[in-house]
Image (cartoon, rainbow, N blue to C red):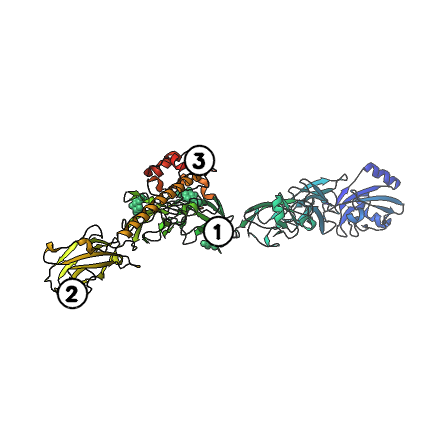
Amino acid sequence: MEYTHLCLRGSLFLFSVLHYAHTEMSYSIAEELKPGSFIGNIPKDLGLDVGALSTRKARIEKGKNDRKYCDINLRTGDLFVAERIDREALCGEKHACVLKFELLFEAPLELHRINVQIQDINDNAPTFPKDVIKFEITESAGKGTRYRVNAAHDADIGPNDVQSYALQQNSNFVLNMQTTSEGRKYGELVLEKELDREEQRDIKLLLTALDGGSPQRSGTVVIHVIVLDANDNAPVFSQAVYEARLAENSPFKTVVITVSASDADEGVNGQVTYEFNQMSDKSRMMFSLDETTGQITVTGNIDFEEGYKYEMFVEAKDGYGLTSDAKVIILITDVNDNPPTISLKTLTNPVPENVSPGTEVGIFNVEDKDSEKNSQVRCSIQQNVPFKLVPSITSYYSLVTTDNLDREVVTIYNITIIATDEGSPPVSSITIFQIDISDVNDNPPVFEEQSYSSYVPENNKPGHSLCSVKAHDPDWRQNGTVIYSLLPGEVNGAPVSSYLSVNGDTGVIQSVRSFDYEQLRSFKVYVMARDNGSPPLSSNVTVSVFITDVNDNTPQILYPAPEGNSFMTELVPKGAQGGSLVSKVIAVDGDSGQNAWLSYQIIKSTDPGLFKIDLHSGEIRTQRDISDSDNMKQNIVVAVKDNGQPSLSATCSMFLLISDNLAEVPELKDMAYEDNGSKLTSYLIIALVSVSTFFLTFIIINLGLRFCRRRKPRLLFDGAVAIPSSYLPPNYADVDGTGTLRSAYNYDAYLTTGSRTSDFKFVTSYNDNTLPADQTLRKNPTDFEEVFGDHDVSPEVRQFHCTNF
Ligand SMILES: *[C@@H]1O[C@H](CO)[C@@H](O)[C@H](O)[C@H]1NC(C)=O
Ligand SMILES: *[C@@H]1O[C@H](CO)[C@@H](O)[C@H](O)[C@H]1NC(C)=O
Ligand SMILES: *[C@@H]1O[C@H](CO)[C@@H](O)[C@H](O)[C@H]1NC(C)=O
């Protein structure tokens, strides 16, 4: 009843109403009073009798809206609520809500106006137009962005209308209250913290609208914020750095690694593509990147030796161009695909055979392009060569001799060097090269025999070949070219060269003179074989010459003295018995052996039966007793014969006188078989032959001398004397290009009687005019002296010497 509020306005005015029957009465009530609720007492307010109402037939006329919200109790005069009065229905949002009635009196007719002011009560809660208010807000919306929320509606007015809003606590939005120009309050969502679709794609907030009534009423609405995607996320790689290992020589299309980036955004914003970024041209040729899958594959030849590490950046890009990148490191792992290389840096070739063991003859380098174990190389040289490898500074090796070399045994070595790396499987390479061993004059000529002997029959012709010596020298070319010569020496006081000569090339030894066994039975010479090296090496051998006997001496009878010189007479006693030694023929023979084995024979005797001679001893004995009848004078002729082939013989006569007394000796002359006439003839013949021989010899010598002077002067050598090749010009050996000395010396042997100088042989040198003077002559004076010194021959003499016969 609080709301039942009587209000009288202007009693003066009431009087006038009354007067004009036109009184206005105003009442104020709250809406929604129960029907029958008291509003006011009319009679009281009009100053009328209650009874008057019924008598005057007071009644309420319907208002404009044809509804009679109030009525009057005629009995009490009370004005009461006749039906529900809903202010909101009647007046809506109008602030002043007044129901106007007319109170009609009859008799007299009086019209009074009744204004019933309807007071609002908070009977309505705020309501929102929808249950859910949807907002679609892009996540890129900036801080402070405002979103108006439709105001809640409250049918009540005034303080009962919506007075405030309350927003559910949240992290992104706050509510800001605003009032429209009409004074309506509404809220604004203000973005206080940016949205992140990727964190929360929709947000539901409860918004409560509160009115100001008492009790307070509220209404809520759900604010549904849908966060729209913005391309606010760059793609993100799963790793900042990708590292992959790839074996070299991997085939094309080998997948190296797959990079992947994710993008939290949606749709196009989240579509990631990949591409290389910051990449060297070299890497670009090696790898390709699949734009969509992020797969990196091989497109080039992966060679560890050309690059063991590739670094590149991969960029991931989403549809609207946000990018990020990641580093990709591709490490190439080595495969043992390179064989070691062996390179010869220096090589002494040829190697002289006299280098001492341990001499370095070559240096080579071994390399392997691979790495680590694959590049560790071991080097070996084949067995059975006198060389070894000595590791030197890194990857260098020296080739060193391990033993003495001998060109005469092995001239060429094929050196095989094998380099093997330590990869698995190992790879190796082989180098073969040749080392030639060059000659050093280290071998003297060696004679085939330890000594030589030769047997030559005496009376040989000069120039007779006795034997030949042969020496071998295994050295190369001139170092192995053998030249023979006689070593100077003397035989019986004469130089050996007057006995023998040796052919420098062939080693054939010839006699220079005729030998006489009876004078010289044997002699020894030394033959030297010398090579042509520098310095030369030589060796010598003895050659023994044995002169063999020839039956050239007739037996010589010593006793009895040769016929004619004496008259040797032997006395034979008359009483001599058979077998008595009467005499002896003594003979000798200059020869020897069979040739001097003499035998005796009686070839003639006065009385053949009386004497006999011993075949071997030459003893003459009686064959029987002497008898008186035997002739006193006996003569026997004895022949002495040697045993040579043919045999030579001599004879002698012996006179035997059978007597006991020398006084009985008759004229012995008679006993000889005189042959004076024939002797004289022989003497004559001998004299004649001598004279003519002398004459002839003289003429021949004379002619010979003239002939010699006309001939070219000759360079003269003793054929038996050695001329070391070092005295020869260096190119001498190459004259014929075969490396052997051509026969440069002629050994012509002549034996003359007389001076020692004439015993030489003279030689024509083919070179004497063609040799460069400075080469030959520089040494010559002394050399010649050395060579010929023993022979009393001056060069001048030699120049013009000539012999003849
Ligand atoms: C060395 O190699 C050559 C070919 O290069 C060959 O003719 C020769 O027989 C080889 N010598 C040896 C001793 O193996
Ligand atoms: C002969 O040996 C010497 C060293 O003694 C050497 O210098 C020379 O080259 C050799 N000659 C030849 C043809 O090998
Ligand atoms: C000859 O050779 C021997 C050794 O065989 C040596 O002792 C001697 O000196 C040599 N003689 C000459 C003259 O060379």
Closer to the eye: label 3 or 2: 2
Q: Position of residue 486 (x, y in %)?
A: 34, 45
Q: Earlier in the sequence, mark 2 or mark 1?
A: 1
Q: Earlier in the sequence, mark 3 or mark 2?
A: 2
Nearer to me, 762 or 309: 762
Nearer to me, 691 or 333: 691
Does the beta carbon of the residue at mark 1 sit less than 8 Å from ligand 1? yes
Secondary structure category for the residue under label 2: loop
Residue receiving disc 3? 775
Q: CA distance from mark 3 to mark 2?
A: 85 Å
Dot 1: few (<14), some (14–19), or many (≥20) neighbours within 10 Å? Answer: few
Instruction: Note whether 528 is above or below 795 in the view shown.
Output: below
Q: Quadrant of residue 732?
A: top left
Q: Given the image, on which type of amino acid does mark 2 rest?
A: Gln
Secondary structure category for the residue under label 1: strand
Q: Given the image, on which type of amino acid does mark 3 rest?
A: Gln
Instruction: Note whether 146 is above or below 571 in the view shown.
Output: above
Left or right: 185, with 538 as reference point: right
Closer to the eye: label 3 or 1: 3
Dot 3: few (<14), some (14–19), or many (≥20) neighbours within 10 Å? Answer: few
Does the beta carbon of the residue at mark 3 sit less than 8 Å from ligand 2? no
Residue receiving disc 1? 432
Q: Position of residue 96 (x, y in %)?
A: 79, 42
Dot 3 and dot 1 residues touching (CB under 8 Å): no
Q: Position of residue 448 (x, y in %)?
A: 35, 53
Q: Earlier in the sequence, mark 3 or mark 1?
A: 1
Dot 2: few (<14), some (14–19), or many (≥20) neighbours within 10 Å? Answer: some
Left or right: 729, with 109 as reference point: left
Secondary structure category for the residue under label 3: helix
Residue receiving disc 2? 623
> Residue 437, can we see it?
yes
